[in-house]
Image (cartoon, helix red, strand yellow):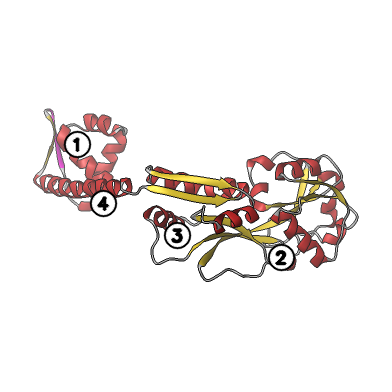
Amino acid sequence: MTSNELLYVKTIADEHSITKAAKKLHVSQPSLTQAVRRIEDELGAVLFTRTSAGTYLTATGRRYYEMAEEILNIYMGFLQDLQDSRMDIRGVLSVGASWYISTYFLTEAITSYCREYPLVDVRLTEKNTSELSEIFKQGELDLIFTHRCPFERDTLPKSLIRRSITREHLYLVAPAALELSRHAVMQPSGTKPLLDLDFIRHIPVVRFREVQRIRQLVDYALDRAQVNPPTLLYTYGFQNALELAAASDAVTFLPERFLNGPAATGYPVEIFDVDRSLNLYWDICLCYRSQESFPPAMQRFLDLLEQTPIT
């Protein structure tokens, strides 16, 4: 029994017509007729009698109607109370994230939150992880989403809470013209072939700026692989790195979510996994201050992240 089924029976009874009820409910008449038959089959009882004057409830149908009306009233009251409670949530929620995390991980969560709590003023600050950490220390942000790399030591003070939200791997991107796939090994459990980084030892790399976490992570993995390829040039944007690699004889490294998105489609490149022991990944983490209770606007956002995990 669903709320729709209860509403179907009530509307047919109120309209004394399946045709009129279907129009009012914005469903097709055959669908509504089938729904009524399904309810009657489940109950083992007839709810309506159909005459030339209209469709009317049987004795069993009247009992069902009274029950449906009572349950629907309770349900609608609950929905109204829920809406009222959401409308009571006000205030400001200051969130910090890199442009990449904001675009590829937070869009759905923030959109859903703003829809449920329209009176909360959500302020999103987009900076790199280092800048966000400084702003957060100054108390100007309620919470921040950051990249945490495997080489970083956990020096977080006890006054702060860090939650790992999801893990993302980076992949090697090479122009198809280099034909590196000849040296790659297909992985039975992976979707991307595995390439030994020794094969790019003499191939130029499109690198990122030193202040960027992705540059630090890639340098860390290359050091672990004991590979030091030459540099083609430095850039800041993921899109630039992809386009430069695709148009040259250079390779680059980019995160999985970006490569799976629409911005990375249509380029003549090959994408490779690397040895996972090189730890070429970062964790997307949520960081906020530890306290006994949080402002309602922030608590609702934390609850939403628990209910709909970011992956």
Q: Splitting the image into 4 quarters, where does residue 151 fall?
A: bottom right
Which one is earlier in the sequence, the residue at label 3 or at label 1? 1
Which one is earlier in the sequence, the residue at label 1 or at label 4? 4
Q: Splitting the image into 4 quarters, where does residue 186 fall?
A: bottom right
Element carrying mark 2: loop
Q: Which residues are magenta?
A: 48-52
Which disc number belongs to residue 276? none
Query: Dot 3 corresponds to which residue?
Result: 306
Query: Dot 2 corresponds to which residue?
Result: 279
Residue type at mark 2?
A: Asn
Q: Nearer the viewer, residue 203 or 215?
A: 215
Residue type at mark 4?
A: Met
Q: CA distance from mark 2 to mark 3?
A: 27 Å
Query: Dot 4 corresponds to which residue?
Result: 1
Tag 3 near tag 4, CB within 8 Å: no
Element carrying mark 4: loop
| Picture coordinates of residue 141, whole percent (x, y) | 51, 53
| Picture coordinates of residue 206, whole percent (x, y) | 81, 48
Which disc number belongs to residue 12? 1
* In this rendering, position of residue 300 left or right of residue 197: left
Q: How many callouts does the rendering have? A: 4
Asked if one can make out residue 68 in the rendered structure from this viewpoint, the answer is yes
The reply to whether the magenta stretch includes residue 49 is: yes
Residue type at mark 3?
A: Glu
